[in-house]
Image: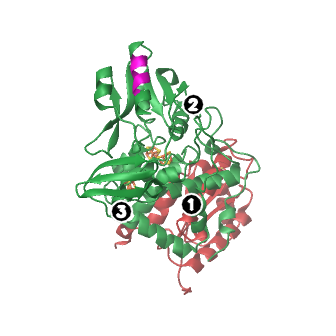
């Protein structure tokens, strides 16, 4: 796949279709890959990577990149195309300035899951027929591929690209995923249990803001959480209230626009399951206002900028009963 | 749960200027009683209520928050309250998901002519919140310091 992508990128640069390419380059370790913009074929040859660890969604970078001169080539996985579409819909990306090549999605690997098996000193990870051969400072270890796949890929909702100019590889289908199972499990707990669960999770938050910074739905020029008058712009939370506030408001601001791309949970250094908050909103929206997938198209009205005269009343919440 | 009979909850009521704020006024002129611990905050339309306002009210010591707006179809700005309805339903459902007691949040449509409904709604809400006791799950200790 990497070779095919590099070949196509160089062709499109050479024939002048694009003047830049956004993809990924290697960081310090083999399992670190980070989004990068390449301007020349030489840069691509030197640094471009695409492997089982490249999972960052590059859509958000296109908010800035698509406003520069000339067209940029972007490689988008199926999940990334939803974010891209949503940003086009919100007039954040200039569609004409991006040449989209759809590439196959994961499942991608999560290095933390490999490390969690007690494997250290990792030098290289090879996927040999879905068995990982992990070369370490201390010898070679083996691990079934599926024990190390990233959380967001495990709950993949779609292998279908919703937008592209061309595809490399085959397009897939929208999947029947179990992504709401954990939300449902929490809904069935008592209020006290849910409260305890979330206290345990949210109290780990160090307010690094990575979840907001990575989120393709969080593209506000001035974010509420950067307002020094807000009292919630600080780093680690001074009280549990701040943590609740940050998480409720962050998830609320992206409700109806969150494509469930999974980036927020992926980047959280504290492994807080932020996707459960986003998915709670998605699940409620689906059941109360009709099935809706943000980013599936660029024309439909988002559920929070729309209404029906016969929508349900907020009283449905307290009518669930008092515990 | 232990119920403290003497506990008087602090209630914050966001009232739309065009309907329930006038409804509150009417209930006053008609000498209908509603508890003094209901603090009314006037807003130009129910859809002016940013979710942050609701959380802030809890942070600063509210034990219950209620939003009152014009009946669906009667919003002074035509459709504001329809948006309120969706947003607030989702927000309250999220608070429930986080384990915040369901009875601490409420939304009611009260017109300018419904002074009696206003008083009733408030009395009932205060009773419900009283049973829950002090808001601890969304409190901010920094605001509790005396
Ligand atoms: S990425 Fe995680 S730790 Fe950082 S602010 Fe978000 S939830 Fe908190
Ligand atoms: S909230 Fe998370 S899952 Fe949703 S769009 Fe943002 S990063 Fe993606
Ligand atoms: S948290 Fe809210 S204000 Fe901040 S960037 Fe995201 S959507 Fe915008
Ligand atoms: S003006 Fe009363 S709810 Fe909009």
Q: Position of residue B54 (x, y in %)?
A: 52, 59
Tell whether position B106 is magenta: no
Nearest-to-viewer mark from 3 and 1 = 3
Q: Is residue B10 above or below residue B79?
A: below
The secondary element bearing badge 2 is classed as loop
Q: Which residues are magenta?
A: A6-13
Determine whether, in the image, residue A297 is placed left or right of residue B73. left
The secondary element bearing badge 1 is classed as helix
Q: Position of residue A100 (x, y in %)?
A: 50, 27
Q: Is residue A70 visible?
A: no
Q: CA distance from mark 3 to mark 1?
A: 32 Å
| Residue annotated with mark 3 | A116
Q: Is residue A5 above or below residue A192?
A: above
Q: What colour is chain B?
A: red
The structure residue drawn at horizontal position 44% and vertical position 24%, both measured from the top left corner, is A73
The structure residue drawn at horizontal position 57% and vertical position 41%, both measured from the top left corner, is A159
Nearest-to-viewer mark from 2 and 1 = 2
Q: Is residue A63 above or below residue A127?
A: above
Return the residue nearer the eye: A76 or B107. Answer: A76
Circle 2 crowding by C-alpha within 10 Å: few under 14, some 14–19, many from 20: many
| Residue annotated with mark 1 | B94
Let me know if marks 3 and 1 both belong to one chain: no
Let me know if marks 2 and 1 both belong to one chain: no
Q: What colour is chain A?
A: green
Circle 3 crowding by C-alpha within 10 Å: few under 14, some 14–19, many from 20: few
Give the label on residue A163, or none: 2
């Amino acid at each position: 796949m990497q070779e095919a992508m590099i070949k196509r990128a160089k062709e499109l640069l050479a024939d002048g279709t694009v003047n830049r390419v956004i993809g990924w380059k290697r960081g310090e370790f083999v399992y670190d890959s980070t989004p990068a913009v390449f301007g020349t074929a030489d840069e691509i040859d030197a640094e471009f990577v695409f492997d089982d660890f490249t999972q960052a969604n590059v859509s958000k970078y296109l908010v800035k990149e698509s406003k520069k001169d000339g067209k940029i080539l972007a490689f988008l996985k199926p999940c990334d195309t939803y974010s891209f579409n949503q940003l086009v819909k919100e007039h954040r990306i200039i569609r004409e300035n991006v040449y989209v090549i759809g590439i196959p999605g994961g499942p991608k690997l999560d290095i933390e899951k490999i490390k969690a098996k007690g494997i250290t000193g990792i030098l290289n990870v090879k996927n040999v027929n879905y068995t990982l051969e992990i070369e370490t400072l201390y010898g070679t270890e083996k691990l079934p591929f599926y024990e190390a796949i990233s959380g967001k890929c495990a709950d993949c909702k779609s292998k279908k690209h919703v937008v592209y100019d061309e595809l490399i590889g085959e397009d897939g289908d929208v999947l029947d995923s179990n992504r709401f199972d954990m939300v449902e499990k929490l809904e069935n707990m008592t209020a006290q249990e849910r409260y305890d669960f979330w206290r345990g999770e949210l109290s780990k938050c160090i307010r690094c803001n990575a979840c907001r910074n990575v989120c393709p739905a969080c593209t506000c020029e001035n974010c509420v959480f950067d307002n020094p008058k807000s009292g919630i712009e600080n780093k680690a939370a001074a009280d549990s209230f701040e943590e609740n506030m940050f998480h409720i408001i962050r998830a609320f601001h992206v409700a109806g626009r969150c494509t469930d791309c999974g980036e927020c949970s992926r980047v959280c250094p504290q492994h807080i399951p932020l996707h459960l908050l986003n998915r709670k909103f998605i699940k409620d929206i689906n059941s109360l206002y009709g099935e809706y997938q943000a980013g599936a198209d660029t024309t439909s009205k988002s559920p929070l900028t729309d209404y029906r005269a016969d929508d349900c009343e907020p009283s449905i919440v307290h009518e669930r009963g008092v515990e | 749960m232990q119920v403290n009979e003497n506990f008087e909850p602090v209630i914050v009521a966001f009232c739309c200027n065009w309907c329930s704020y006038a409804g509150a006024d009417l209930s006053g002129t008609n000498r209908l009683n509603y508890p003094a611990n209901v603090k009314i905050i006037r807003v130009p339309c129910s859809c002016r209520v940013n979710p942050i306002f609701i959380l802030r009210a809890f942070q600063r010591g509210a034990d219950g928050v209620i939003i009152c707006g014009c009946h669906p179809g009667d919003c002074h700005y035509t459709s504001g309250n329809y948006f309120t309805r969706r947003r607030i339903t989702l927000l309250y459902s999220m608070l429930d998901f986080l384990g915040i007691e369901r009875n601490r949040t409420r939304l009611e449509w009260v017109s300018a002519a419904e002074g009696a409904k206003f008083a009733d709604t408030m009395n009932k809400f205060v009773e419900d919140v009283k049973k829950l006791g002090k808001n601890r799950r969304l409190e901010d200790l920094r605001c509790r310091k005396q």
